[in-house]
Image: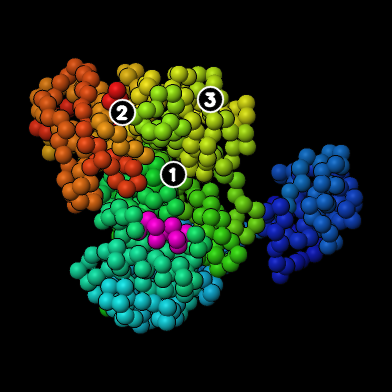
Amino acid sequence: MFSVAVATVLSVHSKELPIVVDGWLCNPTRLMVKAPAQSARAAAVKVNGRVIATFPQIGWATVELPPVDLHAARKAMESVSGVQKVAYDRAAQLAYDPNDPLWPNEWHMRQIKCDLAWDTSKGSDQTIVADIDTGCLVTHPDLAANINVGLSYNFVDNNTDVTDVRGHGTGTAGLIGAVQDNGIGLSGACPHLQIMVLKACNDSGYLYDSYLVPAYLYGADHGARVFSMSYFSDRVSEAEKSAMDYAVAHNVLPIAAAGNASSIIPFYPGAYENVMAVAATDENNQRCWFSNYGTWVDVSAPGQDLVTTANNGDYMGFAGTSGATPHVAGVAALLIGAKPTATSDEVRDAIEDTANSLFQPPFGEISNYGLVDAQAALNTILTVPAPPKPCVVRYVATLGQGPATSQIERTSSTTARIYGRGFQGLQDLKIIRNGKLCTILNRSRDWVDFILVFRNQGDVQVWDGSNLIATVPDPVVPRICNCLVEASAPTASVTGNFFDTVIDDGKTMVATRDSNGNIILEGTFRKVLANATMQLRVNRFFTMPGGSENIQLYDWSSASYPYGNWVDVSVLSTSTTPSMTLINVPDIARYIDFEGTVYVRIVGSNLPAGDTLEIDSMRLQDRR
């Protein structure tokens, strides 16, 4: 037997294909053993194998076996005296390089490891992705082979002409599934698929419910497995939500842009809980300056300095969460193509649970799960499901509903929701408040609903068996239902987070002044149920005298966000003394969107240089 730094083997199996064992892609007839040479040989003999290479520098050896059950052989070898560890001979793969000449410019596909995923699968011609957009140049030489013209439809004019005047839809189609290895242009995230072009945006750039609702229903009824929706903010619509629910019930995975307002305010359709919302990141895996973010955003993908197909038959640059979304839609198509029996929930779980968390001060995690990883998602859909991401508790909000007959009559309890991620991984979930076990009503991956009893005042604790996962400050003042804010500042830097805005404890969220002398801090109260009269309760101060403060709510009776009006509910001179302001909101219904969200912002104007706004608490509560 001989020893070399780079293994020289006694038998060569260079053409063997790997197999999957215990979730690992590995050599079918070899194991790696960490043991002294004598013990390694004894372990090999026990399974009718032989040591074919040793690596004394690191104390490992390679064992060749006849065709056997590798899992059983590994266990048998581990029982031999002196053997420290037995591992599978795991396989690495070369990253696939398409022959498309623009491939070197597609950093964004490599960023989410599409090239590594293509070594395993490039999708399937049976998978249909509905690109709901401005139409598409279906004759584009880099798209034509992947577009199903027979299924495509124009819901603006109710005909089959999906001509793309604006170019947006041709761009998103290229990112989803431009043809690979045709010697021209570039490659989409999923090279093998069918793109169903659904034109639901008119040539002036507007998408109406009367376009979108039938597009969703048509896509669901005609076999689409994924919706790619690169639009946002122009509606909160009960009809749209109903059509989306219909599509999800028909095994569609809807994927939508989070929006480009640099805001934590939820934009639709991405903010619907059954839609995967996508933020945009740059080449350094930082949030693109324009991208929305927050706990309602699910994943992120590249959205800046992209290259894709253009509606003049050429290629163009592209950016925005509109560009991030089709990357994720393409990855979803890759997974479905590799495993057609996978449900939309399984595909979504695989994408989210394998995403790479991105933490960026001062925003924290800009999306609930992180940057999409196509290779890891594909591996987990084909082998063993990835373990759920560790449970993270973001915040708790009362839902304004409960066992009592109405909110006015509620005196003893309410329903509350814990927002976060990873709750499906908790085997023995317990919610405890002031030592009392709370009744859990329902839960998903991202939230848990429970009954919160008013008399049991105290912080809310989340436990998995005997392990404390998180403690959240008390969300309820006795006999008062509160909705707690998730807040940030779009035009200035922020320290602290929404946990610091929960209780009056001197721990503050701090927002700094921008270059225009203003501070704008915005936030959302979620799952609000309208009461006759509610109060906005704000405890805050400015660090320097001078300027004015406007506290505003967004008026949904004026228009859907952001086309309507912010309404002043309080106008004051700034104060450098911590002060509590209680603002009566007698007509709260006009400020609540269809999903039960109230948007709030504090605007400080004409502030001196160096001024900051510090928020100790901000709540929306019943007025008792």
Mark 1 or 3 closer to N-term?
A: 1
Q: Residue at x 24, y 49 (%)?
A: 561
Give the magenta range.
240-248
Q: Secondary structure at mark 2?
A: strand
Camera-nearest label, 2 or 3: 2
Mark 2 or 1 closer to N-term?
A: 1
Mark linked to residue 621: 2
Quadrant showing the N terminus: bottom right
Residue 521, image x and y in percent?
24, 35
CA separation, marks 1 and 3?
24 Å
Above-or-below relation of 120 to 390: below
Q: Is residue 342 visible?
A: yes
Quarter of the view holding residue 132:
bottom left
Q: Secondary structure at mark 3?
A: strand
Mark 2 or 3 closer to N-term?
A: 3
Q: Is residue 378 left or right of residue 477?
A: right
CA separation, marks 2 and 3?
22 Å
Q: Residue at x 34, y 29 (%)?
A: 408
Residue at the spot of label 1: 368
* Front residue of 185 and 440: 440
Q: Secondary structure at mark 1?
A: loop
Q: Amino acid at mark 1?
A: Asn
Q: Is residue 332 visible?
A: no
Verify CB contact (< 8 Å) between mark 2 and mark 1.
no
Residue at the spot of label 3: 432
